[in-house]
Amino acid sequence: MGERKLTRSQERFEHGGRVLHYVRSGEGPPVILLHNGGTSHAIWDELTPRLEGHECFAFDLLGFGDSSKPGSGYELSAHVERLGAFIDAKGLAPVHLVGNCMGSAISLRFAMERPRDVRSLVLFNTLTPATFKRGLYGPFTPLPTKAPGVIRFMSGLALGRSLGRFGVRTQLGRHGKDRGVDRRPELREAYASADQSRSLLEVLGDLPNYGVLDTFTPPPEFPPIFTLWGEENRVLPSREGRVFVEGLRPARQEWLEGCGHLPMLERPEVAAAMVHAFLTSPEAADSRA
């Protein structure tokens, strides 16, 4: 399955006085894609053209990309509420949800609240307290409560393009480094914004509310789940990921060799083929159809 040219449109959705930007492409059953903290819809640019037969909505979450950056409203519950409002406004249910890290957590939490409105879940590297604590940035977890002044100071910093590239590189496995994913300007420059840094640190402060995911066991009739995890992920290490995935009992799981936190950019052909195969599989394609 090769990449193909798609008609893409930049669109916006207003909710609660805030604007969410997203890229819409393709035709067919709807797929909503949610990125990890610190990036934008751009992480899906090599995946969505390969999801033939689906209409894709790749979002900039509130606080990231071209969406509003109000300095508040970044709690997991608020992201889930906005996702539901969009699905309802566009009449997309039941919908496939695809996420990475924070985006996976939002997708899973939404499905826990509204399982009948989700056709399937594709979860890359799901963010939870347990998957985060042993990772590269795990030592920062106590700062919001123990040193809020440090967080306020850090949230005002823009890393700049050079440090932004370093930040991206720390998330990559060897395939991503070989592909030069850290040289992509849309990823580097995401870290050059103080507003976006603030949004990312607000996620850290809300991390305890992600704990409900660590203890969740899908009940019967829950939407089918496909998990993907980078074996060389230093942000959410695969060792902790395996414990989380075991409890989730997905219909399919893949551990991507040579990939870190951004498999959809590190091995796009492989990741896209796996996602497409799952979305068109009987358990996902026929679920709640």
Image (cartoon, helix red, strand yellow):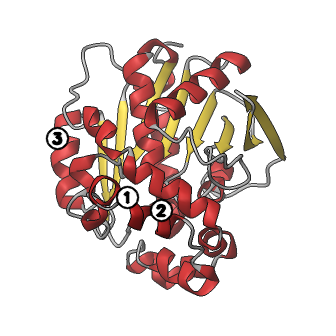
Q: Earlier in the sequence, mark 2 or mark 3?
A: 2
Which residue is at a point 65% across and 68% down the rendered structure image?
Answer: 193
Residue that carries the numbered disc 2 in the rendered image: 152
Give residue 283's position: percent from left, percent from top.
40, 24
Dot in front, 1 or 3: 1
Give residue 129's position: percent from left, percent from top.
25, 48
Q: Secondary structure at mark 3?
A: helix
Residue 194 at least partly seen: yes
Q: Secondary structure at mark 1?
A: helix
Asked if residue 98 lies left or right of residue 43, the reply is: left
Q: Secondary structure at mark 2?
A: helix
Asked if residue 86 lies left or right of residue 235, the reply is: right
Tell me, for residue 246, which label it has, or none: 3
Q: Earlier in the sequence, mark 1 or mark 3?
A: 1
In this rendered view, identify the residue nearer to me: 80 or 23.
80
- Indicate the quadrant containing the C terminus: top left, top right, bottom left or bottom right: top right
| Amino acid bearing label 2 | Arg
| Amino acid bearing label 1 | Pro
Which residue is at a point 50% across and 51% down the rendered structure image?
Answer: 273
Tell me, for residue 148, which label it has, or none: 1
| Amino acid bearing label 3 | Glu
Question: Up-down: is 270 above or below 87?
Answer: below
Tell me, for residue 104, which label it has, or none: none
Q: What is the C-alpha distance between the residues marked 2 and 3?
A: 37 Å
